[in-house]
Image: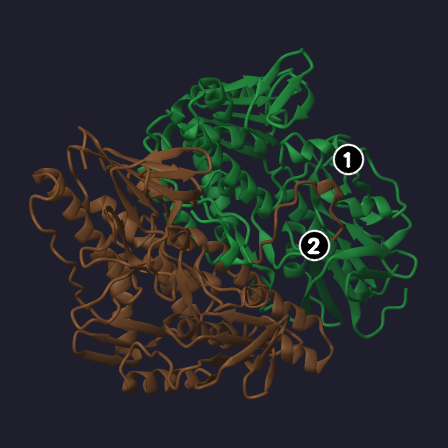
Chain colours: A brown, B green
């Protein structure tokens, strides 16, 4: 590949992988263009807090332009990517075409319903700010509807929340929903007792938090049960309809809110590339993280199936995506210095720094290196790690204060229901 | 009217008027029900800050249930009011019917396009959180589109913002838009210079801020012009189309964003009551603020045309609505104590505490009693008054910090573009 004076490096996606790449890749002979269809980087690990009204949307989102304002020779393009033409080495967007010398695929993942896209309508996933705002709206409205209802069976259905999927997202959502109902909303209503809300966590595997050691899974389940969450392991969902989950054991659960945290798959762009994918749609990358047959194209994070030293898939978590981004940034910069093919490319090595999940406001489960934590220490570790991650976020102080305030008062500040814009206010119904 | 043991007091609307009524009305023989179609009280004077990305939506909204959690014998109903049946003394909502002994109408106002509802589509008003989020989205997207455009004329159109209406809302919006473009976004883009954005404020009257004395209007106009806003007084809008404002003098202004701050009218419910209204749809209330012919029904704030001691209409501002609310709360409580008709009802007396508008981040115009302020002192007075109003808001500290941070860094934190929920993420386009 002939790299001219300014190598064009195009990065698709401004998540943890894409942004970390931009921040670490510096080369005087390269111009970086990052493409995202939103204008903000999303701090996904806290997305569930927006869904349960603990934080507001801007608390966990930051304009991409601000983050990269001081990065030289970088450009931000707000665009929908339509197609990647690997042969012609160009990215086709809705309104422009971007030729590249190097391409970094970092679009992350989307919610996967495992062949049942029709469930999406009744059981929203939690991947975007819009998802979180929709869930927040639905959760809060359910209690309002229950307050207005006079039918006890209907009230019970309205106050039932089913969370499908017992990974970290599902566990965090279940714990946060339990606290929303039992503490935050407790004194708000006259006709219902929100503390009577039923929160059910459904997991197909024999244990929740399968990415943690079994003893931590057990601890996590006990901690959730202490918050009043009903944990159903080894339980599979057969069908989801409006307001109803049908289980494979024949049981049905009537629930106004059904939240889907059971799985993700790589961004659907991977399916159009004509390269080999795993079942989750991830690209089976080479050891240096490039796309087989296309050494100028790399895939990061949730779009890539990379293997660790034991041959196991690198997990789809932010630290892994960031490690991959730094690897690729170094690799491309070295290649621009030396000229392509001068030195063999080093393989990516994943360093497992640990895994953690928070459960409600003061519990959790974590493994950091060989140290296992549960309960309050795990929660504290989670908090510290996430605040460190938030460094550089202008809202860090606001987020910390919001949390501290909520922690001591059990009142969540973002508990507002917003709807859709009304463009014709004069024609809106009275009320 | 025979008031039974528990008089049923129904309050429509949880704005400044409705909530102040609930907080001041206490009577052991009464049950208060407040009805609102949203779950939050909105701090409307700061709505323009959400529209220009200075504050997030939850910063200026608070759940009604939280505000009234400690008010005894009060109930909150989230409902759309369909109809008020004055003869049968009941309020018909979408899902329930509320009979009343006393009714307080406090639904406020909606944007008025003076007989041109078709303009709403092209020139959104600013009355609800949804309005503010829509405007925020459109303003930020315009700069993104300009960055992507290569046509200078199109870039100029995208970077033009027209604000129709030179009252406090229009002036505050114009000043805030100017600072958004000239300071906040200044370094974010590579191909455009946001400081070149054109902001035009159009006012039909000979001067802006017509509710203030003429010298303050002049000062306000000079302060806006110092921020780079083009102020066009004595200029009338003839038509508004998509991306274009046509003036009566024949001139047209091509602008991606057209914001409507030219007028409001009373909530349309007033038109269904069969009582006398003024041109803005306000109920011509009796001196005690009751609806003529219906001594058990009161109207407050923007729904009422009340007159001050000189016979001039009481202005449609929050302090006026709150004064009316306290008057009606006292009046009903006295009547429940004494029995109806025992004593003549006292008339409402409006106390003018002043008027103020802020212009950008450190300027403004205010009249407080007989004291006139301009520039930084006016801005400071505005800040102090609004922070006092915010007392009781749990987000007060967060708002103050957000502002302080923004003030010193010129970076606004809520600068994110959110769209509509996607219920079928698997089918969303790649990108």
Residue B404 image point, x, y percent: 36, 43
Check disc 2 and report the residue beneath it: B13
Q: Earlier in the sequence, mark 2 or mark 1?
A: 2
Quickly name the residue at label 1.
Answer: B280
- x 48%, y 60%: residue: A413
The image quarter containing residue B102 is bottom right
Q: Quadrant of residue A141?
A: bottom right
Q: Residue A215: where, in percent of width, then height?
A: 28, 87
Name the residue nearer the viewer: B377 or A345: A345
- Circle 1 packing at 10 Å, graded few (<14), some (14-19), many (20+), is some
Image disc number at residue A386:
none
Tell me: A112 left or right of A154: left
Helix, strand or loop for disc 1:
loop
Q: Are the residues at dot 2 and dot 1 in contact (C-beta closer than 8 Å)?
A: no
Q: Nearer the viewer, residue A85 or B366?
A: A85
Q: Is residue B226 above or below residue A208?
A: above
Q: Are marks 2 and 1 on the same chain?
A: yes
Q: Taking A411 as reference, is B187 left or right?
A: left
B290 horizontally vs A102: left or right: right
Q: Residues within 10 Å of mark 2 (few under 14, many from 20)?
A: many
Q: From this viewpoint, is residue B397 visible?
A: no
Picture residue at 66% right of the left edge, 26% below the top: B241
Q: Quadrant of the N terminus of chain A?
A: top left
Dot 1 falls on which chain?
A: B
> Can the viewer see residue A369?
yes
Kindly indicate the quadrant of the structure image that contains residue A351. bottom left
Whole-percent x, y for residue B298 in the image: 79, 52
Residue B301 x, y percent position in the rendering: 70, 45
Name which residue lies at 26% across and 82% down: A213
Q: Residue at x 28, y 37 (%)?
A: A100
Q: Chain of mark 2?
A: B
Query: Label 2's element?
Result: loop
């Amino acid at each position: 590949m002939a790299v001219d004076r300014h190598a064009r490096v195009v990065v698709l996606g401004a998540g943890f992988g894409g942004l970390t790449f931009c921040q670490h890749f510096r080369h005087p002979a390269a111009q970086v263009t990052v493409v995202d269809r939103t204008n903000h980087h999303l701090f996904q690990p806290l997305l569930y807090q927006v869904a349960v009204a603990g934080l507001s949307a801007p608390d966990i989102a930051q304009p991409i332009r601000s983050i990269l304002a001081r990065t030289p020779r970088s450009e931000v393009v707000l665009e929908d990517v339509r197609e990647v033409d690997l042969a012609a080495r160009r990215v086709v967007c809705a309104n422009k075409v971007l030729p590249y010398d190097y391409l970094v695929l970092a679009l992350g993942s989307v919610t996967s319903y495992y062949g049942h896209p029709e469930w999406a309508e009744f059981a929203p996933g939690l991947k975007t700010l819009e998802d979180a705002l929709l869930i927040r709206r639905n959760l809060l409205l359910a209690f309002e509807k229950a307050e207005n209802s006079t039918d006890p069976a209907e009230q019970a259905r309205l106050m039932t929340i089913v969370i499908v999927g017992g990974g970290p997202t599902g566990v965090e959502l279940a714990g946060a929903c339990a606290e929303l109902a039992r503490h935050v909303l407790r004194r708000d209503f006259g006709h219902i007792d929100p503390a009577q809300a039923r929160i059910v966590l459904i997991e197909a595997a024999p244990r929740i938090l399968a990415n943690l050691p079994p003893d931590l899974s057990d601890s996590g389940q006990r901690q959730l049960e202490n918050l009043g969450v009903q944990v159903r392991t080894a339980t599979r969902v057969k069908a989801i309809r409006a307001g109803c989950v049908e289980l494979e054991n024949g049981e049905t659960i009537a629930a106004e809110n059904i939240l889907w945290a059971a799985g993700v798959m790589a961004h659907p762009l991977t399916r159009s590339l004509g390269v080999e994918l795993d079942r989750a749609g991830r690209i089976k990358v080479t050891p240096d993280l490039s796309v087989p047959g296309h050494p100028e194209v790399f895939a990061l994070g949730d779009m890539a199936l990379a293997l660790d030293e034991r041959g196991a898939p690198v997990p789809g978590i932010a630290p892994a995506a960031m490690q991959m981004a730094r690897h690729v940034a170094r690799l491309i910069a070295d290649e621009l210095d030396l000229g392509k093919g001068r030195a063999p490319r080093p393989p990516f090595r994943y360093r497992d720094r640990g895994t953690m999940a928070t459960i409600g406001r003061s519990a959790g489960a974590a493994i950091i290196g060989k140290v296992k934590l549960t309960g309050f220490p795990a929660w504290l570790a989670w908090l510290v790690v996430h605040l460190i991650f938030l460094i550089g976020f202008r809202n860090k102080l606001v987020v910390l204060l919001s949390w501290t305030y909520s922690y001591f008062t059990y009142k969540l500040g973002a508990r507002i229901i917003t709807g859709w814009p009304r463009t014709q206010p004069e024609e809106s119904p009275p009320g």
